[in-house]
Amino acid sequence: MDAQQQQKVHIEKAQNFMRQYRDPESRELKKLSANQFMDVWSHYDGDGNGYIEGTELDGFLKEFVSSANTSDLGPEV
């Protein structure tokens, strides 16, 4: 992996939106309020059409899985 790819991966890890919804010790998802759920939905519904489609779902799933990975801990934890 070249330096540019490594920097991109580092930036993606630092910007993982889902990490804020995980317990920093257990890495389990916290309970979400309705407002928090809507924040998550709005974050991943990039075009704002009310649906999480294709690439939006891909982005959510990648961050969701990565947010549980304890070796990828970033500054937002």
Image (tube, grey):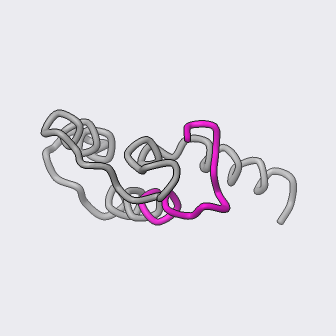
Foreground residue among 69 and 26 = 26
Picture residue at 13% right of the left edge, 46% below the top? 50
Foreground residue among 20 and 61 = 20
Left/right placement of residue 2 relative to residue 32 reads right
Residue 69 percent location from the top left of the image: 56, 64
Foreground residue among 2 and 76 = 76
Picture quadrant of residue 74: top right
Picture residue at 25% right of the left edge, 36% below the top? 39
Residue that extends furthest to the right in the rendered view of this protein:
3
> What range is drawn magenta here?
63-77
Picture residue at 32% right of the left edge, 49% below the top? 30
Q: Quadrant of the N terminus?
A: bottom right
The vertical placement of 34 against 9, above or below, is above
Residue 76 percent location from the top left of the image: 56, 37
Q: Quadrant of the C terminus?
A: top right
Residue 44 percent location from the top left of the image: 32, 47
